[in-house]
Image (cartoon, helix red, strand yellow):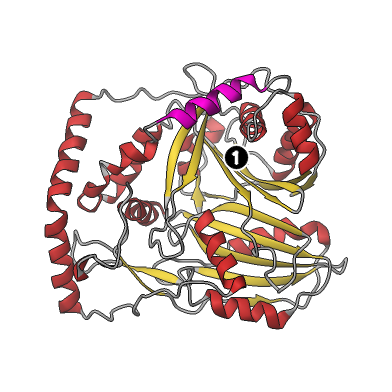
């Protein structure tokens, strides 16, 4: 079971980050890479500003608006504290409707910082066809995707649980140090055991050989610290058409998504070097309600799919899904046993731990997240249902070195709203040259055609 705080937790242990959240925080400190979630509402009209402001005012009192306070001690646990103000931006200058996703990307790249704030942002943008978009962006270090959607829905419905956090520094320096020292002692048995497991694994596991295509002289000329803006598209397909395709290909409920993602991954070259299969990293929510303090209340499971023939038959995916449902161990189970050592490891060791766990050198994992039917009320951000609702994962401040380490990037987030299936796709292949927005749009369009699907593509 993943760690979390509760009302019965000793004072020195309250509001500390869970181990998985602390790992994500250490990765952020080591790389500067911001992993964000974004929700987009599209209306065919102007929004009801009064109702929208009411939702915003509720939202900033909930766990969406919290920050991380690092410990004053070298090996102390970071904790949750109350957030600062969340920017609420409103533009009066309409943009061309074709620039919806460009505007969304621009809003996602505005400053979001889970330590110094703000932890999230909200914005309204009108378009030249009379439509209006609303965007909310938040850091994954504060909440995972499903957690954020539930909190936003609670703000819309007025059913949220106000966050219990005090302002940064409210404990006082001395009191904070004493409390954190007690937590270090309480964690000591788990920390020692985790360090021993890591040392044993390092001793007996040989270093993995470096695999992958040879980097050309032209590619090597790129500075590792160069920031790469990842291409992204959003696809919307009629849910009846999607379901009919799934049935036509002999798929069980929910198997068309991994089949589609595996086919797209194959086009992008994200296939395992060992056997050519696609490794889908599938998150499963384990959130225990709105009072659950964890940011990442999820488990990660690996689902292996051979991409050949998926456009004709989804039988391989049916088998892989069955194996996934029966799996007792997940990537998170393995990770959890090592996490108590995080505070005692150099920051760069967090990258090494994640690299070895998900085996970026061979498996080239693809993130495939299905949020399913979106929470009731989420679509009524201004008091009335929107026409279209998109949920996205956005990576910001990604360096070329990051992409070389993971041999590229592919993240797909799917959701279901108002008889529509939406796929928000962020991807980049470095070789032979980095993927462009137009190239990604073309690859997605080809994959849709291969499955006999038609959809609206925003890029």
Does the stretch in magenta take in 278? no
Q: Position of residue 304 (x, y in %)?
A: 51, 25
At x 59% / y 77%, what residue is drawn?
56
Specify start and end residues of the magenta stretch as a single range.
314-327
User: What residue occupies the far bottom of the structure in this picture?
Assistant: 50
Q: Position of residue 284 (x, y in %)?
A: 48, 44
Q: Main secondary structure of the magenta part?
A: helix
Give above or below for 50 relative to 257.
Answer: below
Residue 149 occupies quadrant: bottom right
Does the stretch in magenta take in 317? yes
Q: Position of residue 24 (x, y in %)?
A: 38, 52
At x 29% / y 51%, what residue is drawn?
347
Q: Position of residue 331 (x, y in %)?
A: 38, 36
- Residue 45 relative to residue 71: left or right: right
SS for callout 1: strand
Counting every numbered tag in the picture gives: 1
Residue 44 occupies quadrant: bottom right
- Residue 145 relative to residue 351: left or right: right
- Residue 167 seen in the figure: yes
User: What residue occupies the far right of the structure in this picture?
Assistant: 129
Tag 1 residue: 428
- Residue 345 seen in the figure: no
- Residue 79 relative to residue 90: left or right: left
Residue nearest the observer in this picture, 110 or 137 = 137
């Amino acid at each position: 079971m993943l760690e979390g705080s509760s009302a019965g937790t000793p004072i020195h242990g309250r509001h500390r980050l869970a181990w998985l959240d602390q790992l994500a925080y250490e990765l952020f400190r080591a790389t500067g890479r911001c992993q964000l979630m974004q929700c987009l509402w599209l209306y065919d009209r102007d929004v009801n500003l009064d109702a929208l402001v009411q939702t915003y005012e509720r939202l900033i009192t909930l766990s969406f608006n919290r920050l991380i306070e690092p410990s004053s001690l070298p090996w102390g646990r970071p904790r949750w504290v109350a957030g600062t103000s969340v920017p609420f931006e409103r533009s009066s200058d309409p943009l061309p409707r074709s620039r919806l996703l460009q505007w969304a990307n621009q809003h996602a790249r505005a400053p979001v910082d889970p330590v110094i704030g703000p932890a999230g942002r909200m914005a309204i943008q009108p378009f030249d066809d009379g439509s209006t978009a609303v965007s909310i962006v938040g850091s994954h270090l504060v909440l995972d995707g499903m957690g954020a959607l539930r909190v936003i829905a609670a703000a819309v419905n007025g059913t949220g649980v106000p966050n219990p956090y005090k302002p940064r520094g409210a404990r006082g320096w001395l009191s904070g140090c004493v409390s954190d020292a007690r937590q270090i002692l309480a964690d000591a048995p788990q920390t020692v055991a985790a360090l021993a497991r890591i040392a044993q694994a390092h001793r007996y596991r040989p270093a993995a050989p470096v695999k992958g295509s040879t980097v050309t002289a032209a590619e090597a000329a790129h500075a590792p610290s160069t920031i790469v803006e990842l291409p992204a598209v959003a696809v919307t397909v009629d849910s009846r058409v999607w379901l009919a395709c799934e049935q036509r290909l002999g798929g069980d409920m929910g198997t068309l998504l991994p089949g589609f993602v595996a086919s797209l991954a194959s086009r992008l070259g994200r296939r395992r070097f060992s056997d050519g299969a696609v490794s889908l990293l599938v998150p499963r929510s384990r959130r225990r309600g709105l009072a659950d303090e964890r940011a990442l209340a999820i488990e990660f499971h690996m689902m292996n799919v051979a991409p050949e023939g998926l456009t004709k038959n989804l039988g391989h995916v049916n088998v892989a899904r069955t194996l996934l449902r029966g799996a007792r161990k997940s990537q998170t189970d393995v990770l959890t046993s090592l996490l108590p050592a995080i505070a005692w490891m150099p920051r760069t060791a967090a990258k090494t731990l994640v690299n070895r766990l998900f085996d970026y050198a061979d498996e080239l994992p693809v993130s495939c997240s299905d949020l399913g039917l979106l929470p009731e009320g989420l679509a009524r951000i201004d008091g009335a249902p929107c026409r279209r609702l998109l949920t996205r994962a956005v990576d910001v401040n990604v360096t070329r070195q990051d992409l070389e380490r993971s041999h590229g990037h592919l993240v797909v987030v799917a959701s279901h709203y108002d008889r529509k299936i939406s796929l928000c796709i962020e991807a980049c292949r470095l070789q032979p040259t980095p993927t462009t927005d137009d190239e990604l749009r073309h690859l997605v369009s080809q994959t849709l055609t291969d499955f006999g699907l038609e959809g609206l593509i925003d890029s």
